[in-house]
Amino acid sequence: MVINLDIQEIIKTFRKNGYKVTAQRLAICKFILSRKDHPSAEQIYQGLSNEYPTISLGTIYKTLHLLKELGLVQELGFNEGSIRYDPDMELHINMVCSKCGKIYDYKAANVKELWNVIISDLGIKPKGQRIDIYYECEDCK
Ligand SMILES: [Zn+2]
Ligand SMILES: [Zn+2]
């Protein structure tokens, strides 16, 4: 299981699957990995457009789609229509502020234990998992 996705691993996965590692793709990957708040495509675009003036939102969407296909990011859709990208494929809890939409990851060892019990009770092999907790963050309280 992938614990902490790093850039070398992403490059390897791209190449193994026959995809070119372009400067823009690499920049998008690095940006997602450097942020702990699960950015949206628009946030990635805003974050990179200074350094990469030729980057387009379309390139970002295509790259995100590719990363998702390769199992390198999780796509988290939310009720209000926003989509956020999470590079952590391991079981963890997304703490989501219901007001400002800020997300951070919470990892609790006992969640994993409980999860394993649930999975073995169900007798299934999950294809993915997602646990979100909604709350109001310090800034919004
Ligand atoms: Zn997360
Ligand atoms: Zn908030």
Image (tube, rainbow, N blue to C red):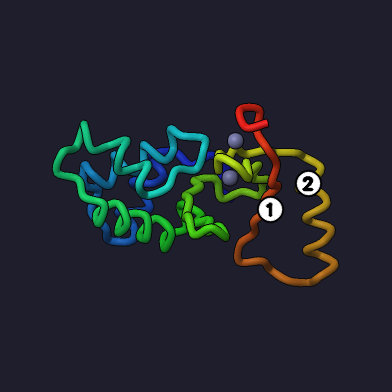
**Residue that sits furthest to the left in the current view:** 54
Residue displayed at 76% across by 48% down: 112
Mark 2 is on which residue type? Val
Q: Please state the horizontal and vertical placement of residue 65, each as a whole percent of the image.
A: 37, 60
Disc 1 and disc 2: Cα gap in Å? 10 Å
Q: Quadrant of ligand 2?
A: top right
Mark 1 is on which residue type? Ile
Q: Earlier in the sequence, mark 1 or mark 2?
A: 2
Disc nearest the viewer among 1 and 2: 1
Element type at mark 1: strand
Residue displayed at 25% across by 48% down: 21
Image quarter of the C terminus? top right
Mark 1 C-beta closer than 8 Å to ligand 1: no
Q: Please state the horizontal and vertical placement of residue 38, each as a whole percent of the image.
A: 50, 43
What residue did someone put label 1 on?
Answer: 131
Kindly check if marks 1 and 2 are in contact, taking CB atoms under 8 A apart as contact: yes
Toward which corner of the image does residue 127 lie, by quadrant?
A: bottom right
**Residue that sits furthest to the bottom in the current view:** 123
Element type at mark 2: helix
Q: Is residue 21 left or right of residue 73?
A: left
